Image: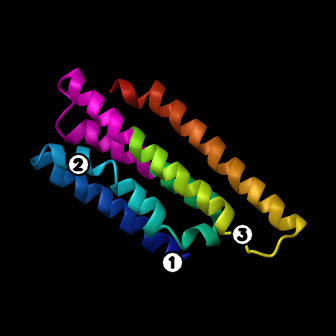
C-alpha cells in the first residue's frame, strides 16, 4: 500500500511540475503531454499493475484527465482554437500510447502458466482497460474538450 501511495504521489508530482513549467514556458507542458503521461502510466506505475490492476488503470486515466485539465487551466494555448486543437492532438496521442501500454500490461501482468483463472484474469484486465478507456474518452469529449 505504501508503494502504491508513493508511486501515485510521484506521478502527480511530475504532472504538476510539468504544468507549472508550462505556465511560465507556454508550449512546454503542451508538448510534454504527448510523452509524460505515457511515462507515468508505463514506467512509473509498472509495479502497481501486479498489485492492483483496476486501481492502476483508473489512476492512469485519471492522470491523463488531470494533465489535460491543468494544461487547459494554467498553460498557454487555450486562447484560440488552434491552441485548443494542439492540446487535443497531444492529449489524444497520450491517450492512445497509454491505452496501448495498459493493454500490453493487461496480458503481461498475468503469469505465463495458462489456466482457466489466468485466462479469466486476462479477459477481466482487458475489459477493465477497454471500459475505462471508453469512459475516459466520453468524459473528455463531452466535458474537458469544451473548456
For label 2, the residue is: 29
Give the residues in magenta.
63-91
Which residue is nearer to you in this view: 38 or 9? 38
Label 1 belongs to which residue?
2
108 left or right of 26 in image: right
Q: CA distance from mark 1 to mark 2?
A: 29 Å
Image quadrant assignment for residue 123: bottom right
Which residue is found at the position 36% from the left and 23% from the top? 146
* Nearer to us: label 1 or label 3: 3
The percent position of residue 145, horizontal first and vertical second, equals 38, 28
Q: Is residue 53 left or right of residue 38?
A: right
Dot 1 lies on which element? helix
In the image, residue 43 above or below residue 65: below
Residue, disc 3 = 110
Please indicate whether residue 19 sits to the left or right of residue 26 in the image.
right
Quadrant where the C terminus lies? Answer: top left
Q: Secondary structure at mark 3?
A: loop
Is 13 a magenta residue? no
Nearer the observer, disc 3 or disc 2?
Answer: 3
State whether residue 59 is above or below residue 78: below
Q: Residue 51's mark?
A: none
- Residue 134: horizontal and vertical position, in percent? 59, 37
Q: Residues under labels 1 and 3: Cα distance? A: 22 Å
Q: Quadrant of residue 86?
A: top left
Above or below residue 118? Residue 60 is above
146 vs 28, nearest the viewer: 28
Amino acid at each position: 500500500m505504501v508503494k502504491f501511495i508513493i508511486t501515485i504521489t510521484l506521478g502527480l508530482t511530475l504532472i504538476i511540475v510539468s504544468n507549472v513549467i508550462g505556465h511560465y514556458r507556454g508550449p512546454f507542458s503542451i508538448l510534454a503531454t504527448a510523452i509524460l503521461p505515457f511515462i507515468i502510466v508505463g514506467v512509473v506505475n509498472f509495479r502497481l499493475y501486479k498489485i492492483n490492476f483496476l486501481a492502476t488503470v483508473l489512476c492512469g486515466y485519471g492522470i491523463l484527465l488531470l494533465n489535460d485539465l491543468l494544461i487547459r487551466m494554467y498553460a498557454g494555448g487555450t486562447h484560440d482554437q488552434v491552441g485548443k486543437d494542439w492540446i487535443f492532438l497531444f492529449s489524444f496521442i497520450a491517450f492512445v500510447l497509454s491505452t496501448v501500454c495498459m493493454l500490453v500490461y493487461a496480458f503481461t501482468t498475468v503469469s505465463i502458466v495458462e489456466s482457466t483463472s489466468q485466462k479469466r484474469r486476462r479477459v477481466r484486465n482487458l475489459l477493465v482497460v477497454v471500459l475505462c478507456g471508453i469512459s475516459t474518452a466520453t468524459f473528455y469529449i463531452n466535458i474537458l474538450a469544451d473548456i
